[in-house]
Amino acid sequence: MDERADTDRVYGEEPDKGADEAMARSAAADGAAPLMIGDTGSGWTAPGFLPGAPAEPETRPQPPDRPAAEAGPVDSSAGAPAAETTEPVPGGGSVDTAAALLAAGRQLFARHGYDGASVRAITAAAGANLGAITYHFGSKKALYNQVVENCVLPLASRVEAALSQPGPVLDRVESVIRAYFEHFAQNPELPQLMMQELVLGGGPPEAAGPPMRRIYGLIQMAVREGQAAGEIRAGDPVLLALSVISQPIFPMLVRRPIQAIAGLDLEDERTRERVMLQMVGFARAGLAAGPGPEENR
């Protein structure tokens, strides 16, 4: 059974044992060594012996978070498959398997999207066994949701902290925009994670919905507070809050086209600071209370 063809299913599902047994019988008829039958989904493979086939040395079961390269002794002369090689986690060092899967998933989901990042690719990049995602998270989708939450929840906390500061509302709104830029600089995969979903015609990732709605609600409350205090001009708080959020989000979501068209590299710290100051000034000017259209005529 070609394991590599099954890149998107959750590892650990019941395999087609009938197909494996047919392959084993065919191999035995040709005088080949016994095949491994009965994938348990727990990160190791139970040996299935055919009549007349030589016994293999006992292999101690390995937990799913232990790389295949560390498995117990295997008699290569018996024809058992070689241990699967994996790539180290970027940065090296000793890393908890769950954390390594999150780091690998974060990079691969951002680069290839949910469908394009296979279980095999993620576990290989994390240096983990193929069953590690099922063992630690339950499914590939659960891993994806955790990756998204780990990126978005800290942003919600930053925005809440910025709006909880004392002082004029416009100063707090400025702090929100700065918090967005700082968060994107520290989490460069986040805009790309969002774009992967948007390009496919969907909304933001499902796991991002609750914290993003929380952020939006907090900014609307700040706008209403500023309007009541006479700091922010009259207008629909829903739309004014949208204008605030758009200032930091838009340039980061389309940073590649911006670089190609305007020559602004938002991965450069000094350029990012220039853009942030422009967004802050634009938002403050657009929100500040002042003479209405009638008074300007």
Image (cartoon, rainbow, N blue to C red):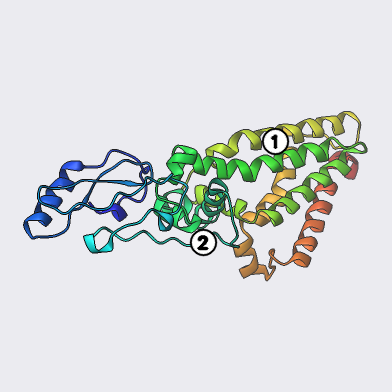
> Front-most of 259 and 95?
95
Locate residue 94, reporting x and y percent: 59, 56
- The three-letter code of the residue at mark 1 reads Tyr
Q: Is residue 77 left or right of residue 294?
A: left
State the SS at label 2: loop
In the rendered image of this protein, does residue 18 appear above or below residue 189?
above
| Of marks 1 and 2, the one in the foreground | 2
Discs 1, 2 touching: Cβ within 8 Å: no
Q: Is residue 167 left or right of residue 96?
A: right
State the SS at label 1: helix
In the rendered image of this protein, does residue 230 appear above or below residue 267?
above
* Residue at the far top in the pictured view: 228
- The three-letter code of the residue at mark 2 reads Pro
- Tell me if I can see residue 119 in this picture: yes
Locate residue 161, reporting x and y percent: 81, 38
> Front-most of 296 and 267?
267
Locate residue 17, reporting x and y percent: 20, 42
Residue corresponding to mark 2: 88
In the rendered image of this protein, does residue 87 appear above or below residue 151?
below
